[in-house]
Image (cartoon, grey):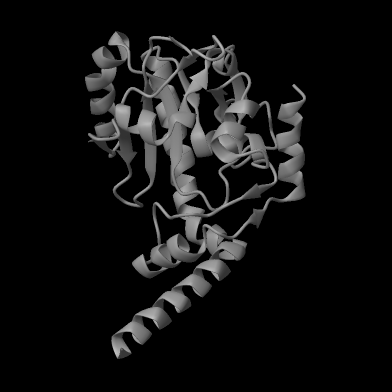
């Protein structure tokens, strides 16, 4: 009986801490400061590699969400996401890109089940994911629209909403994204992304993605305790976005 009470108390404390953490923006800004600096550098170096080896890529998932909301990493996000096609050219240049990244000091790791390449900075733990998409277009039975989906059945089954329609992806356009995002003309801040991101983001993050968010987990954390607290108590808490970020996101809806 005492054990049940103790476990219940720990869970209640963890839940309440998780609720408080997701509301404390200063906690996330301080926690992620060095991580974000590293991630911006990693994304720039990845873009330069893709350009060097003539690969088509697009920012996706949480990174695209940040680019649309405020032209920067969301303050509570702690990794970056890009997508590209798993075609013959990618497989040909992958060994050369891997060597280049290793020379920069990064670890290149293939997540076998999810079929995601993870670029990891061993000093900070910063993580940049490459999501690989089947280059062959598929046709949706219900609508007749052409789409691309992830090149592994695990993600296709667990997260079917991550597919991207041809008319959402193309024509690709450049996004201003970086720590000095107010300067839209700064070359170092320009990255390719979907031409029509709104419906993709609605499908992945719901209708109100541009004005509210949820902190459901930590990829990196100061402690395992905080990771557990956020996982337990954070997901049910709505985080309001800054008005400037909401206005930035809405500008994409009208384009």
Looking at the image, is 159 positioned above or below residue 231? above
Image quadrant containing the C terminus: top right
User: Looking at the rendering, which quadrant does residue 245 occupy?
Assistant: top right
Name the residue nearer the viewer: 2 or 203: 2
Q: Quadrant of the N terminus?
A: bottom left
Is residue 220 shown left or right of residue 30? left
Count all numbered tags in the image, as a single digit: 0
- Residue 186 can be seen in this image: no
Residue at (68%, 50%) from the top-left corner?
241
The percent position of residue 159, horizontal first and vertical second, equals 42, 34
On the image, the x and y values in percent for residue 223 come to 37, 67
Residue placed furthest toward the bottom: 2
- Is 115 or 47 nearer to us in this picture? 115
Is residue 191 left or right of 221 when viewed as pictured?
right
Which residue is rendered at x = 55% and y = 29% of the image? 188
Q: In this view, does 72 lie above or below 200?
A: below
* x and y, in percent, of residue 246 in the image: 73, 42
Q: Where is residue 134 in the image (x, y as percent from the top left)?
A: 36, 16
Q: Quadrant of residue 210?
A: top right
Q: Is residue 241 above or below residue 16?
A: above
Whether residue 105 is visible:
yes
| 95 left or right, relative to 248 | left
Please give the name of the residue rendered at 42% of the width and 37% of the height, measured from the top-left corner.
42
The residue nearer to you, when weighing 32 against 201, is 201
Left or right of 47: which side holds 118?
left
């Amino acid at each position: 009986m005492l054990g049940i009470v103790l476990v219940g108390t720990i869970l209640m404390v963890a839940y309440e801490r998780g609720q408080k953490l997701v509301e404390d923006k200063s906690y996330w800004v301080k926690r992620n400061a060095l991580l974000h600096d590293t991630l911006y550098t990693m994304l720039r170096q990845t873009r330069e590699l893709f350009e060097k080896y003539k690969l088509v890529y697009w920012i996706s998932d949480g990174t695209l969400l940040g680019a649309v909301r405020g032209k920067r990493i969301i303050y509570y996000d702690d990794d970056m996401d890009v997508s590209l096609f798993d075609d013959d050219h990618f497989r040909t240049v992958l060994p050369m890109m891997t060597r280049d990244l290793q020379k920069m000091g990064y670890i290149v790791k293939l997540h076998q089940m999810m079929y995601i390449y993870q670029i990891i900075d061993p000093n900070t733990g910063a993580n940049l994911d490459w999501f690989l998409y089947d280059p062959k277009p598929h046709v949706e039975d219900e609508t007749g629209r052409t789409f691309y989906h992830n090149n592994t059945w695990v993600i296709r089954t667990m997260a079917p909403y991550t597919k991207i329609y041809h008319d959402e992806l193309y024509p690709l356009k450049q996004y201003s994204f970086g720590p000095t995002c107010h300067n839209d003309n700064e070359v170092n801040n320009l990255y390719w992304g979907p031409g029509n991101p709104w419906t993709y983001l609605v499908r992945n993050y719901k209708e109100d993605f541009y004005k509210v968010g949820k902190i459901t987990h930590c990829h990196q954390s100061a402690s395992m305790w905080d990771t557990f607290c956020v996982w337990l108590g954070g997901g049910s808490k709505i985080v309001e976005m800054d008005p400037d970020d909401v206005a930035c996101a809405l500008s994409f809806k009208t384009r």
